[in-house]
Image (tube, rainbow, N blue to C red):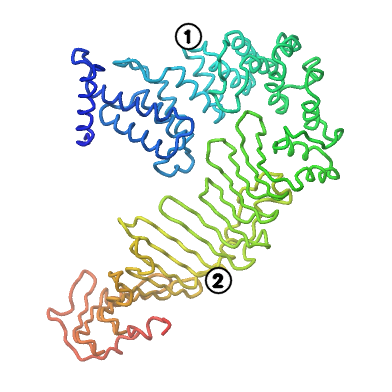
């Protein structure tokens, strides 16, 4: 149902447009479509800003939502919604396993699949939508999807040099060198002044023609290789800059490219030789490569053990951000911050979808706080005692589980002796060992109803529970639970339980009543109700008795004498038609006396 507020404002906006001559009644346009288009154009203007802040993004989101009130989302709306996500808009937390980048990529694909004729021209050109989609396909390594979709487009769309370059890279990454070379040669020929490969991402900034030539050389196109010296004379340093990622990734080898080594700068040659033959080179790295963590790692893994210390010395007293782009595709998968020669934090995004699988904070050279599994699992280590774990936490949609360890009770090396030079280890824990080392487990659950929070605290020793406390509180009134339940365990088996009900968070000291639970072999078999908090139950039910399914007892005046008692057999048959009024003593119902029946601390 359309929002009346939006309808009223849309009608006003339409009136303004008609009055101004932008839309005339004779145009035959659907008023709803006209209003939707105006809001879409508003969103497009806002999202064209280079670095929009949250205010701008929220305005763009409002414009898109308003447009949807008047017309079902089409290709323009899908494109703009994807752009909104890729610009950093977050209405809700990312779904685990599906990042905003991935959702944006899927929306862009749908915008390209929408071939429905529109009542007016599109706000965004097909090429603009295709370029943004291609950039995300390269980022997410969806090379086959990119190449297949490119080949399905009409010839006119396929002649856009930016789209040709994206398809050529995809072909090369798929190992289709001949196809990659053909596309690269075609792209170089079709490139015109102003062709901006930077539309695919900031890492592609530079001359388009030398970029196509470098790609053709990486694809081993013989003509492109044989005329490299001529290309060098025309494009100079631009040629070396576009060759750099292909040289460092190993796609281009000196042995396959004639006199390429003689054309490159000495610093570039040294960097390539360090990657391929580190044992024969010194460790002097030019400042252009000083932030290249992938280069450092490649060197360190290739040199003998005796020379690793020389690699480590390259980072002595270093302060700055190191980037690791192992395949040099323009999208770093790791960031490592150094402060005075020591690691500060490390973030890893292996699939390059914008969600970091690992986030490690260091204390010296050892990890101190780790988050992984898209931030859903966290570990804190005891400072100065790595790899001894202090606590762990797991976050799900509406719940949080925290484990607190005994000192030295559980250890796990996220980074082995290789430290930040190697990939972190995936958790592979022995569950028995994990619980054996756990001292306390906290579970917090939100959303049991509209405004409450449930909490459970369990204390353990040698992997077995000793005592558990459960609470339900109003979300805005912490520390004043509506009810509390406590359970005592014997050899890991529940032995007794007590529930205290308040139902009035503003009076934390005034409990209304308590309910006691009796257990046998870990199963609850009896209940006792104490409404006056006197320690004398007024209602009893025990279905573990040999004869009776249910026993009901009332101590109406709380004088510890039973006033009313009746027994109900299986099938709800009452023993007597009249309630039995007796003068039996409360002690006759042992263990239903609170002090004897529930071992609570006094």
Name the one closer to the observer, 327 or 365. 365
Name the one closer to the observer, 145 or 60. 60
Seen at 66% across and 18% down, the residue is 215
Q: Toward which corner of the image does residue 582 lie, by quadrant? A: bottom left
Name the one closer to the observer, 222 or 310. 310
Above-or-below relation of 102 to 20: below
Seen at 84% across and 41% down, the residue is 304
Q: Toward which corner of the image does residue 590 lie, by quadrant? A: bottom left
Relative to residue 153, is residue 183 drawn left or right?
right
- The residue tagged 2 is 461
Could you say which disc has been placed on residue 156 in the image? 1
Picture coordinates of residue 414 (x, y %)? 65, 52
Question: Dot 2: within a 10 Å radius of its alpha carbon, few (fewer than 14), some, or many (20 or more) residues?
Answer: some
Above-or-below relation of 389 to 1: below
Q: Give the alpha-carbon distance from disc 2 to disc 1, as whole Å.
A: 72 Å
Could you say which disc has been placed on residue 206 in the image? none
């Amino acid at each position: 149902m359309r929002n009346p507020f939006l309808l009223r404002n849309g009608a006003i906006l339409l009136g303004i447009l008609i009055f101004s001559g932008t839309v005339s009644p004779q145009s035959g346009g659907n008023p709803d479509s006209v209003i939707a288009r105006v809001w879409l154009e508003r969103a497009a203007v806002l999202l064209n800003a280079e670095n929009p802040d949250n205010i701008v993004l929220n305005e763009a989101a409002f414009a898109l939502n308003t447009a949807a009130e008047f017309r079902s989302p089409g290709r323009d709306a899908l494109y703009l919604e994807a752009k909104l996500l890729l610009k950093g808009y977050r209405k809700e937390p990312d779904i685990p396993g599906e990042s905003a980048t991935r959702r944006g990529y899927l929306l862009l694909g749908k915008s390209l699949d929408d071939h429905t004729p529109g009542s007016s021209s599109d706000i965004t050109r097909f090429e603009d939508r295709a370029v943004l989609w291609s950039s995300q396909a390269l980022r997410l390594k969806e090379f086959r999807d990119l190449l297949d979709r490119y080949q399905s487009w009409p010839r006119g769309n396929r002649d856009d040099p930016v789209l040709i370059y994206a398809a050529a890279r995809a072909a090369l990454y798929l190992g289709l060198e001949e196809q990659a070379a053909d596309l690269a040669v075609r792209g170089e020929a079709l490139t015109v002044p102003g062709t901006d490969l930077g539309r695919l991402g900031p890492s592609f900034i530079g001359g388009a023609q030398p970029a196509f030539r470098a790609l053709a050389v990486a694809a081993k196109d013989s003509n492109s290789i044989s005329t490299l010296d001529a290309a060098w004379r025309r494009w100079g340093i631009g040629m070396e800059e576009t060759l750099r990622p292909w040289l460092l990734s190993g796609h281009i080898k000196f042995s396959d490219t004639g006199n390429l080594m003689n054309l490159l700068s000495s610093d570039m040659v040294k960097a390539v030789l360090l990657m391929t033959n580190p044992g024969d080179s010194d460790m002097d790295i030019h400042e252009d490569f000083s932030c290249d963590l992938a280069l450092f790692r490649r060197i360190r893994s290739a040199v003998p053990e005796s020379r690793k210390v020389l690699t480590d010395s390259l980072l002595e007293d270093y302060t700055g951000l190191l980037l690791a782009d192992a395949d040099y595709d323009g999208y770093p998968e790791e960031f490592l911050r150094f402060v005075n020669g020591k690691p500060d934090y490390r973030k890893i995004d292996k699939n390059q979808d914008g969600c970091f699988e690992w986030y490690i904070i260091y204390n010296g050279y050892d990890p101190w706080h780790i988050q992984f599994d898209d931030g859903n699992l966290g570990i804190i280590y005891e400072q100065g005692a790595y790899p001894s774990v202090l606590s762990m936490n797991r976050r799900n949609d509406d719940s949080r589980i925290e484990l607190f360890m005994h000192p030295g009770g559980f250890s796990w090396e996220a980074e082995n002796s290789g430290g930040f030079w190697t990939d972190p280890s995936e958790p592979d824990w022995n569950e028995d060992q994990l619980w054996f080392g756990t001292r306390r487990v906290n579970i917090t659950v939100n959303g049991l109803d509209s405004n409450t929070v449930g909490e459970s605290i369990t204390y353990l020793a040698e992997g077995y529970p000793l005592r558990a406390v459960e609470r339900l509180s109003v979300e805005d009134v912490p520390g004043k639970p509506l009810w509390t339940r406590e359970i005592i365990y014997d050899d890991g088996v529940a032995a007794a339980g007590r529930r205290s009900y308040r139902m009035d968070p503003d009076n934390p000291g005034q409990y209304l009543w308590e309910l006691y639970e009796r257990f046998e072999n870990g199963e609850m078999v009896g209940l006792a109700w104490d409404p006056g908090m006197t320690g004398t139950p007024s209602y009893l039910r025990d279905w573990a008795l040999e004869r009776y399914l249910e026993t009901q007892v009332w101590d109406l005046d709380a004088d510890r004498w039973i006033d009313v008692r009746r027994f109900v057999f299986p099938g709800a048959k009452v023993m007597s038609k009249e309630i039995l009024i007796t003068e039996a003593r409360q002690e006759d119902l042992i263990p239903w006396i609170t002090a004897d029946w529930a071992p609570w601390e006094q």
